[in-house]
Image (cartoon, grey):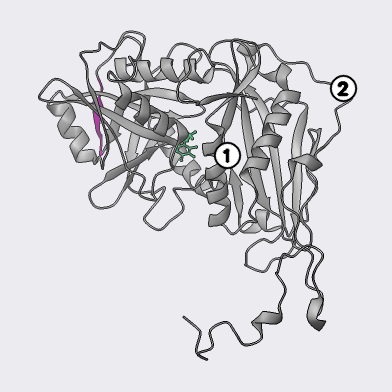
Amino acid sequence: MGVTNGVNGTNGVHAIPAVNGNGVNGTNGHAPLKAKLAELDASKLTITLSETLKPVPPPETLVFGKTMTDHMLYVTYEPEVGWSAPEIKPYGPLTLDPASSCFQYCPNVFEGMKAYTGPDGKPRLFRPELNMARMRRSADRVALPRFDTDQLLILIRRIVEIEARWVPKAKGHSLYIRPTIIGTRPSLGVQASDHAVLYVILSPTGPYFRTGSRPVALLAVDEHVRSWPGGTGGFKLALNYAPTFMPAQLAAKKGYDQILWLLGEDRRITEAGAMNFFAVVKRDDGDLDVITPPIDGTILPGVTRDSCLALASAHPSRTSLPNLPNSLVLHTHEQLITIPQLFEWSEQGRLLEAFCVGTAVVVATVGRIGYDDKDVVLPKYEGGMGPVAKALYERIVDLQEGKIEWEGWSVPC
Ligand SMILES: *Cc1c(COP(=O)(O)O)cnc(C)c1O
């Protein structure tokens, strides 16, 4: 692979000091090499607290993503320097060069996670290492600078601690955390951004559905496609979302809440809105199949999706999910689901439930699915949610709020 001189790695290479050698550069008569770029380092954190704190609005008035807390975490990356000393400082506008690549080519990454109040009154996070790992994969996909995910998590815990008064205490309420990285290379050249700003903002939120769990209507769409093999749908990149806004408006005009994204000739289901999709199908032996499409690059690997799969497959052998009989066995499958298959299950009376999952909503029940001027209508349940959706919702919220312990998923800040 590119080595043609037969003396693999020996011609002159011996004299080059370690690229990242700290302070021993420039030996053997070679020009000094660049100083090591600074890593993201939580121990360098500086904190400037806001002089005037905002009033925390009553939890019942919260609208998702509207209210921001008093502070933000802010770090920059410069090609000659690396990561700056992280700052927690008053929430406020960023000043950016208008040529910054984030405005032009969208090398932008985000995460969505939440802090919950535990029984001890202290904030907790839910499986945050999964968000950190996903954020790093997303950053890699758009060639943004790498960062130490453990250090970022330390910094996030710190800002959540500082904003503890913003973490709502009511059930189903939480502090939404939005870690973001934007490419800030100040040049119009179409290439990777070697400048970046990493920031974290926080917003208190209530339950997605205030009036019980109203089942959502999905419109299955194949005219517009959210993700495709080799594309970026499996990463939390800002560029995946803007193209969904216009189709979402079309669906809303037709009376649907969210789009059910399809892909390919076989009209396989990928996701619903910006949530992962599950179907619950009755088997001949009376057990239930709990099915979600596999992580094949076209599906965002959701933390909630993974949690649902793990909990459903643990019932009833390792745990009893709320209000599900132990005689009911849930068989989980990461398996392709097509629209014709879904319609067939429905006609056979085997499609018992469909639901969408994600951090914002946790679990949302699907009431009907439109495709090609026909609607699949799901069975109706008292209170809105089917038993499997409800069991997963209740258990996940209890785990997030630290009421139950399960495999170290909920961690105190
Ligand atoms: C964030 C997101 C999800 C849900 O992921 P969680 O980790 O469960 O919040 C699902 N699909 C898309 C497209 C997303 O952006």
Up the image or down, 170 lies above or below 111; here it is above
Q: Which residue appears at 52% of the width and 91% of the height?
A: 5
Residue carrying label 1: 111
Most foreground residue, 160 or 35? 35
Most foreground residue, 410 or 306? 410
At numbered mark 1, what does the secondary structure look like: helix, strand or loop?
loop
Q: Magenta span covers which residues?
A: 372-378
Q: Which amino acid does label 2 sit on?
A: Thr
Q: How many other residues sit within 10 Å of disc 2, few (<14), some (14-19) or many (≥20)?
A: few
Tell whether position 232 is magenta.
no
User: In the drawing, does residue 22 fall left or right of residue 316?
Assistant: right
Residue 84 x %, y %? 79, 50
Tell whether position 377 is magenta.
yes
> Which comes before the other along the chain, label 1 or label 2?
2
Q: Which residue appears at 15% of the width and 33% of the height?
A: 344
Q: Which residue appears at 80% of the width and 68% of the height?
A: 24
Residue 254 x %, y %? 38, 32
